[in-house]
Amino acid sequence: MSERALSDTEIEKMQTPVWQQVHAAIDAGDHEAAKALLDRAVAQWSSLQDYSINWIASLLTFIADELGEPAVERALRKTGDEFVRPRRSTDTAWGDLPAAQRAKVISRAMLANTGAVEVSEDDEKIILSFRCGSGGRLIDDGRYEGEHPYRTLTERSGPTFMRDEMWVYCAHCSVNNEIQPVEWGETPTSIEYPPTRPGEACVHHVYKDVTKVPVADYDRIGKAKP
């Protein structure tokens, strides 16, 4: 028999997810090893996330180039109908949840997406200012520039928030988080203002009373306020 390429210890580590290795290190009282393993898990997740967001942006760019910008909206709508809507189907309507709870859910998701957030509040709304870990990262990394840039949408419509330009990856924010929820008889997840240039935050307005969302915020997604 030829010499083995992998030892039993190496095979065991290959077969054991990092988070299970973290648990084992904690149980063994090796807190420094647990911290190092946790950092490794975050780095691995970040690498996979980078792969995924570039895959999505590249695919949406191809759709826009081959079929036109309206096809991007159709593709995102399919995702919304088949994946996003079932996730929102709960016993309590989104708009009936307290604003603090809605803001916490959004913030938790964005932080899990390797983002950062600043929170403020006024009389009518909670304001979440994100350094977005996905769409915002693509903008800040210059992926809409250079030799193979991702598509910038230029047709003023609901998916672009009626802007002259919108980063293709960020179009899911308008379609899946605002336009479709309104069509489903609900309220927008939040009122989003994606960056207009690199280094700018993505700002979300979470209204304490969803009936107080301004008419202008419905106009910009091509919908009438209920």
Image (cartoon, rainbow, N blue to C red):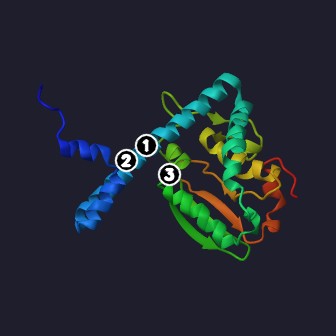
Say which residue label 2 marks.
44
Give amino acid for label 2: Gln
Q: How many dots with numbers? A: 3
Contact between marks 1 and 2 (CB within 8 A): the answer is yes
Other-residue count near label 2 (Cα within 10 Å), few / some / many at <14 / 14–19 / ≥20: few
Say which residue label 3 marks.
133
**Which one is nearer the viewer's eye here, 86 or 214?**
86
Disc 2 and disc 3: Cα gap in Å? 15 Å
Mark 1 residue element: helix
Residue extending farthest top: 66
Give amino acid for label 1: Leu
| Chain-order first, disc 1 or disc 3 | 1
**Would residue 93 be found to the left or right of residue 127 on screen?**
right
> Quadrant location of residue 209?
bottom right
Mark 2 residue element: helix
Is residue 167 depicted above or below 192 in this figure?
Answer: above
From the top left corner, tell me how far across and down residue 138 is, in percent. Answer: 51, 43
From the top left corner, tell me how far across and down residue 79 is, in percent. Answer: 67, 40
Say which residue label 1 marks.
48
Q: Is the N terminus in the top left, top right, bottom left or bottom right quadrant? A: top left
Q: Residue at x 72, y 45 (%)?
A: 175
Contact between marks 1 and 3 (CB within 8 A): the answer is no
Other-residue count near label 1 (Cα within 10 Å), few / some / many at <14 / 14–19 / ≥20: few
From the top left corner, tell me how far across and down residue 184 is, in percent. Answer: 80, 51
Mark 3 residue element: loop
Q: Nearer the viewer, mark 2 or mark 3?
A: 2
**Would residue 162 be found to the left or right of residue 104 on screen?**
right
Is residue 162 depicted above or below 73 in this figure?
Answer: below
Q: Residue at x 23, y 69 (%)?
A: 29
